Amino acid sequence: MTATDPALTALAQSWCALSLLHGRIEAHIERALQAKHDLSVREYSLLDVLSRQHDGEGGHLQMKQVADAVVLSQSATTRLVTRLEDRGLLERYLCPTDRRGIYTNVTEAGLRLLEEARPTNDAALREALDAAAGNPDLAPLVHAVESLHVPA
């Protein structure tokens, strides 16, 4: 393949369209969450991921798993956890069976904020997808996103 190969160019253009759609959606959600709840998209995502933990087998996530889920490096995830912990939205504790492990849980205040912010997140997502659907280059991607049935 060469740099002018039509297949490569089409693939690169598709990737740019997907990146554009993601950026627009994230920016729209970011503005809504910041304005109404003083939360960033990453903070909301972290609270959401951690709120799904449970006490059963495999119910608590290690920091690497959390970092993968919120698409951040482990160090950036640790800084994000620290910021939310400083705000009283998260708390850390030692793993009861392995004293080297540290878990992070969402506090009651964090759960309340997450529940307040969830409708804002969902509405902003819907608004961003609706706006993007009007763009012929992005409409097929919007349709693909809307047709996905990914388990939570």
Image (cartoon, rainbow, N blue to C red):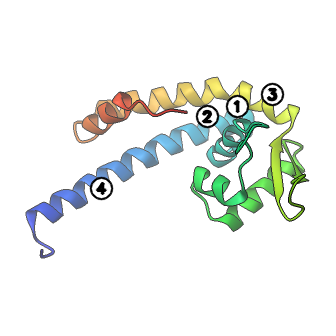
Q: Which mark is residue 15?
A: 4
Disc 1 crowd, CA 10 A, few/some/many (<14, 14-19, 20+): few
Q: Assign a secondary structure to mark 4.
A: helix
Mark closest to the chain's N terminus, 3 or 2: 2
- Work out which quarter of the rendered image holds the N terminus and state it: bottom left
| Inter-mark Cα distance, 4 to 2 | 26 Å
> As rendered, which of 71 and 100 lies closer to the eye?
100
Callout 2: SS: helix
Q: Quadrant of residue 101?
A: bottom right
Q: Earlier in the sequence, mark 4 or mark 3?
A: 4
For disc 1, the marked residue is 36
In the image, what residue type sits under mark 3? Arg
Q: Nearer the viewer, residue 43 or 32?
A: 43
Q: Which residue is mark 3?
A: 112
Q: Secondary structure at mark 1?
A: helix
Rounded to the nearest angstrom, the CA distance separating label 1 from label 2 is 6 Å
Disc ID at residue 32: 2
Amino acid type of the residue that numbered disc 1 sits on in the rendered structure: Lys
Image position of 39 with respect to 119: above or below: below
